[in-house]
Amino acid sequence: MDRPYTLWSIRGLLFVFDIENTHDLEREEIIVSKDVNDEGELCELFDVLLCPEFFNYSEEERVRLIETLSFFLNKGDNFDGVFNKMDTYFDEDIKDRRQFMAVLLSCLKRYQNQESGVI
């Protein structure tokens, strides 16, 4: 039987942006230097900080993260369950949480396809 989808896995992936994450001045400076409401800058941020984190997960876990994110986007979730439980280093509030997650999904799919050799 398939496990139900939960936002905890997405929250875990985004922990790299959380203030509760261990102190890393270089990482913090990268985070605050990007406009999280600009799709291009958000992709750059994900490429630098989330891509390496994403590949710490097993193949199965990576696929499951993509499926989970797709599920909640398709369901119309507002992702308050993720963002209301974390304080981030972001310099400003995320204006459109669904757009943030759509960009995240796009990046995760790109990373997974690059790993698989799919262009």
Image (cartoon, rainbow, N blue to C red):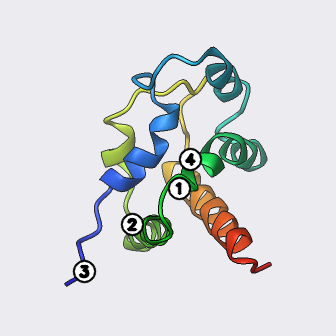
- Residue matched to label 2: 72
**Residue 47 location in percent, x, y?**
71, 48
**Residue 17 location in percent, x, y?**
52, 33
Kind of residue at badge 4: Glu
User: Which quadrant of the rendered structure holds the N terminus?
Assistant: bottom left
Q: Are marks 2 and 4 in contact (CB under 8 Å)?
A: no
Mark 4 vs mark 3, foreground winner is 4
Q: Is residue 8 above or below residue 29?
A: below
**Residue 37 location in percent, x, y?**
66, 41
Q: Are marks 1 and 2 in contact (CB under 8 Å)?
A: yes
Using the rendered view, name the quadrant where residue 36 is placed.
top right
**SS at mark 3 in the image:** loop
Mark 1 vs mark 4, foreground winner is 4
- Residue matched to label 1: 101
On residue 2, the disc is 3
Q: Earlier in the sequence, mark 1 or mark 2?
A: 2
